[in-house]
Image (cartoon, grey):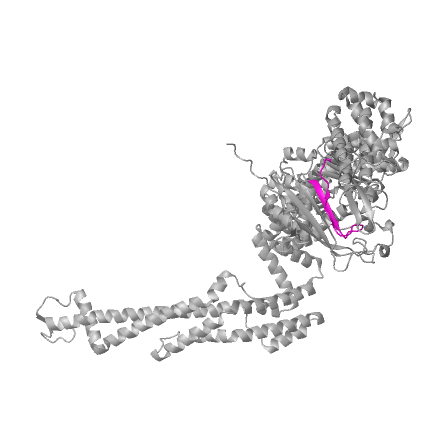
């Protein structure tokens, strides 16, 4: 069993063209996927910014390889270039029912519309327009006639949907039933909620039900789109000229659902990032580094055009590909330093050394302006190492280790308290003398070498003294460990005090601040006052920490008495509690000093050398950030150019699809035009779409006519030369073209032959209708023109699925649609119906009309070419029999002449005071006439 082809992804807008474009690979497909569609722009207004930013890392990764547009799915695009019918339901109309809608009153039986060709005839004011508008309103919920301003004052069209005699509390609705190719049934019902008001902007409100389920507005649009391509399959009398009389832009809207270009046009219009917008895509640091680089470029641009100059390195640094940019930026900065600031950097050959030298020069200049800066400036930055050193864990851990060692020493001291100090001294001396060999550890008894008492060192005495040795060693080790841990903890406290002094020097005395303020310029005094307030406050907040650390160091300077262990633990806890917010205080101190430093720098920046060095330092301190920013700028320009390429691809795809659509529309309209018109001087030439231009590349459709006087052919705008009849023919051509390409299976024409002469009645009936019916379409034609109705009947009498209906209007019942009488069988059926009602005289007259129609059709079918059925329109059956119909009928059905003569004699009963023949004779007559249709090969 073959594997089913996997379903293709659909763009979230469900647009077929965008859904095709996302099938490819690379940035084009990604760009199309990022685009939310016109309906999603309100939800994702920054979709292009998101896409653009996401492309920058890709451009940096691609580097010299560049970025490719990605392959398009050519097969899918080729299919799009050949427009075919949309995939909508193959539905045909089988019935229509209306209640209290315009001319309709209370609903009777539904109008039976089963048939491939349905012609509904009615004189003016019988309700034909009501029937057409019932179909229009069912699909749209609106009446185009009410929406067209030229149709009258809105106040005069108030409440124009409901029947004006509708009883109170009665509902207005229209329902239609459709049947699909597999006999599935679909019923639409629209009910009126609120009719039109008097304001020109008022709209009618209604609800639509599908198979009994009420639809939301979104569900309604989806259902009508799925089953009818979103466009009603009806050409109204008052919209017949809409296509050609519209503006070129409005004609484009007429074919909107077939063009399917709105979404891709919206993408093309919005997929633009011009130079002014590049600034919106700032580097990761927000553009700070790039601003520093721009300042250097501004200060050193004068010589940038000179080949080999130091400043030329700036262009080289930013213009090349990202590879090696860090080295180029560093070399550019060193070139500037060597050429412009050699005295400042001395003999430095590396950027770090040059940076430190340049900073020192600048600091000296600022400190000369405000000497107190030297005392305020931190000696080191609050980096990760400093943060670790100043955090509470080292102090806590060190204090813990010391307290543990101290506890061990105290325990050892308590354990040795039972032995006198003299005994411990003697034990240690005996152990040393034994190691030295002075005392014999094996002798039973010997003279003590210290006291010289003979026999005083017995084995017992030696054993007792040796037992004291381990106790001595444990006590010594514990005391040594405690002293070591205490020294380490003191060093930690001292280091913290020194580091804190380096990070946030102690605020100067008031006298020093006053002296600095007195020496400051007026512009500096404000900055100095702000710095003083902040630094003094921070110093005050840091003072308890300084004191705790200093006290801790003092406590640990000598052996700590046992009772002071708790004090050391308290100091530890105090330090731990105060280091939690230390980073914020250091940052405040640093900001205050830097602000003051900057203010001093502004005072001394009047000199160009200082300004140039300061700008150079800004880049030299942030080379890595500058490199990232320059890479970012390079990538932005690459993406900008690449977006332009992707946009060109989209424009070309759109052009190809648009041209294919135009060709299809134009070719189809030409086919229909040629079926309707045989004009030789002026005729429809083509639909023309000039190259789109302007914002969004709007599409405009122009209608061109061809003028041919036999010597010269010119193409002009059709509106200049077309007659009203030609305009109508072109409206029909546009409607049929759109409907066929949308996939409609039923077409409804409301009086389509306005302003046409009788020749064009016949071309519509005999040329266009067969073309549509042969394509499997159901065609419903509403007309008030009896001649046009007869032309259709003559042209399609052989069609078994041809139905005629008639419309009449009654004062009491309103608009009514009944069976017609254009065909032989319809007339015979009507005769039988009249007979059943006892109206025998009218019934026999209807039989005569059926026989006359039979003779006309026989003459039309079997006469020589060129026979005009209209030549018989005033002839009686007997005259047509003598004119040739009799020979044609008797040639097919022998003996029919006598029977037909007898039936015709019956049809004149009632004249000359003769009574009509009875119902039995009537039924026998209709049965015989029906039997002739088969042998004569006449369908109807």
Q: Nearer the viewer, residue 47 or 487?
A: 47
The picture places residue 209, in percent across and down from the top left corner, at: 67, 51
Residue 592 found in image quarter: bottom right
Residue at the spot 52% in from the left edge and 75% down from the top edge: 543
User: Where on the picture, by quarter, is residue 358?
Assistant: bottom right
Image coordinates for residue 726, horizontal then vertical, percent: 86, 35
Majority secondary structure in the magenta region: loop
Q: What residue sits 80% from the left and 32% below the top?
A: 850
Q: Is 112 covered by the magenta stretch?
A: yes
Q: Residue 459 lies in magenta, yes or no?
A: no
| Quadrant into which the C terminus falls | top right
The image quarter in which residue 537 lies: bottom right
Residue 846, horizontal then vertical, whole percent: 81, 35
Q: Is residue 391 above or below residue 83?
A: below
**Residue situated in front as seen by the camera: 291 or 146:** 146
Q: In the displayed structure, does residue 795 sit left or right of residue 714?
A: left
The answer to whether residue 843 is visible is: yes
Residue in the foreground of this view, choosing between 117 and 137: 117
Q: Hey, which residue is sitting farthest left in the picture? A: 444
Mark count: 0
Camera-nearest residue between 772 and 338: 772
* Residue 691 in sight: no
898, above or below 355, in the image: above
- In the displayed structure, would residue 922 be above or below residue 607? above
Residue found farthest to the bottom: 563
Q: Which residues are magenta?
A: 92-116
Residue 221: percent from left, percent from top? 69, 48
Residue 782 is left or right of residue 216, and the answer is: right
């Amino acid at each position: 069993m073959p594997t089913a082809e996997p379903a293709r992804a659909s763009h979230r807008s469900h647009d077929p063209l965008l859904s095709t474009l996302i099938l490819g690979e690379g940035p084009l497909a990604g760009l199309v996927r990022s685009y939310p569609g016109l309906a999603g722009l309100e939800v994702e207004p920054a979709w292009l910014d998101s896409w653009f930013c996401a492309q920058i890392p890709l451009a940096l990764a691609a580097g010299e390889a560049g970025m490719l547009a990605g392959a398009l799915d050519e097969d899918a695009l080729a299919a799009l270039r050949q427009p075919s019918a949309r995939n909508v339901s193959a539905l045909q109309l089988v019935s229509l029912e209306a209640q209290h809608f315009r001319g309709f009153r209370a609903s009777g039986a539904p109008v039976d519309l089963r048939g491939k060709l349905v012609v509904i005839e009615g004189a003016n004011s019988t309700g034909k327009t009501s029937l057409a508008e019932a179909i229009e309103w069912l699909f749209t919920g609106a009446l185009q006639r009410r929406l067209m301003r030229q149709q009258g004052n809105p106040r005069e069209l108030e409440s124009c949907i409901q029947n004006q005699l509708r009883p109170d509390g009665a509902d207005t609705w229209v329902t239609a039933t459709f049947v699909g190719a597999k006999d599935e049934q679909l019923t639409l019902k629209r009910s009126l909620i609120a009719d039109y008001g008097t304001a020109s902007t008022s709209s009618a409100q209604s609800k639509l039900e599908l198979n009994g389920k009420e639809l939301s507005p979104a569900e309604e649009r989806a259902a009508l789109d799925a089953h009818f391509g979103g466009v009603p399959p009806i050409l109204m009398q008052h919209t017949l000229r809409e296509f050609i009389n519209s503006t070129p832009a409005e004609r484009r809207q007429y074919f909107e659902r077939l063009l399917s270009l709105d979404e891709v046009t919206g993408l093309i219009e919005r997929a633009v990032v011009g130079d002014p917008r590049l600034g919106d895509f700032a580097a990761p640091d927000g553009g700070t580094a790039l601003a520093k680089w721009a300042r250097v470029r501004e200060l050193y641009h004068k010589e940038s055009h000179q080949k080999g100059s130091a400043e030329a390195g700036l262009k080289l640094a930013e213009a090349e590909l990202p590879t090696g940019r860090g080295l180029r930026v560093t070399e550019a900065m060193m070139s500037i330093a060597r050429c412009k600031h050699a005295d400042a950097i001395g003999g430095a050959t590396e950027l770090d050394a040059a940076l430190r030298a340049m900073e020192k020069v600048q600091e000296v200049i600022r400190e000369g302006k405000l000497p107190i800066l030297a005392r305020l400036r931190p000696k080191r930055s609050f980096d990760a190492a400093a943060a670790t050193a100043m955090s509470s864990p080292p102090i806590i851990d060190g204090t813990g280790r010391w307290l543990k060692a101290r506890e061990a020493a105290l325990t050892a001291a308590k354990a040795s308290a039972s032995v006198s100090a003299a005994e411990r001294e003697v034990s240690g001396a005996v152990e040393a003398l034994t190691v030295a060999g002075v005392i014999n550890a094996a002798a039973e008894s010997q003279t003590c070498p210290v006291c010289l008492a003979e026999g005083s060192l017995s084995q017992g005495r030696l054993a007792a003294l040796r037992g004291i040795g381990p106790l001595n060693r444990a006590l010594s080790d514990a005391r040594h460990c405690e002293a070591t841990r205490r020294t380490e903890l003191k060093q930690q406290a001292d280091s913290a005090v020194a580091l804190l002094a380096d990070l946030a020097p102690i605020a100067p005395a008031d006298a020093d601040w006053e002296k600095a303020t007195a020496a400051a310029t007026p512009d500096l005094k404000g900055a100095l006052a702000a710095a003083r307030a902040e630094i003094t406050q921070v110093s005050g907040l840091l003072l308890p920490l300084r004191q705790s650390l200093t006290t801790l160091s003092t406590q640990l300077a000598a052996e700590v008495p046992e009772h002071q262990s708790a004090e050391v633990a308290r100091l530890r806890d105090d330090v731990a509690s105060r280091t939690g917010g230390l980073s914020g205080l250091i940052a405040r101190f640093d900001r205050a000093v830097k602000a003051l430093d900057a203010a001093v720098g502004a005072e001394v920046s009047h000199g160009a050398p200082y300004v140039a060095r300061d700008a150079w330092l800004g880049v030299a301190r942030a080379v890595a950030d500058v490199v990232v920013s320059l890479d970012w700028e390079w990538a932005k320009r690459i993406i900008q150019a690449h977006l332009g390429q992707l946009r060109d691809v989209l424009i070309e795809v759109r052009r190809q699809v648009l041209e294919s659509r135009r060709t299809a529309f134009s070719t189809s309209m030409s086919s229909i035009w040629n079926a309707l018109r045989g004009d030789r001087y002026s005729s429809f030439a083509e639909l023309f779409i000039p190259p789109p231009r302007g914002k969004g590349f709007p599409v405009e459709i122009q209608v061109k006519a061809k003028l041919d006087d036999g010597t010269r052919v010119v193409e002009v705008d059709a509106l200049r030369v077309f007659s009203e009849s030609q305009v109508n023919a072109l409206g029909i051509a546009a409607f049929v073209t759109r409907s066929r390409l949308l996939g409609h299976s039923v077409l409804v024409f409301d009086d389509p032959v306005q302003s046409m002469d009788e020749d064009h009645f016949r071309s519509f009936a005999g040329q266009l209708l067969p073309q549509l019916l042969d394509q499997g379409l159901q065609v419903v034609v509403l007309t008030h023109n009896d001649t046009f109705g007869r032309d259709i009947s003559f042209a399609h009498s052989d069609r078994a699925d041809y139905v005629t209906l008639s419309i009449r209007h009654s004062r009491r019942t309103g608009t009514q649609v009944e069976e017609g009488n254009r065909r032989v069988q319809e007339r015979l059926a009507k005769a039988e119906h009249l007979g059943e009602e006892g109206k025998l005289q009218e019934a026999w007259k209807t039989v005569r009309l059926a026989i006359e129609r039979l003779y006309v059709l026989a003459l039309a079918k079997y006469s020589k070419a060129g026979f005009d059925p209209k030549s018989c329109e005033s002839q009686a059956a007997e005259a047509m029999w003598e004119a040739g119909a009799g020979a044609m009928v008797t040639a097919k059905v022998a003996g029919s002449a006598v029977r037909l003569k007898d039936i015709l004699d019956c049809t004149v009963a009632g004249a000359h005071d003769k009574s009509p023949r009875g119902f039995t004779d009537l039924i026998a007559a209709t049965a015989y006439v029906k039997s002739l249709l088969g042998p004569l090969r006449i369908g109807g």
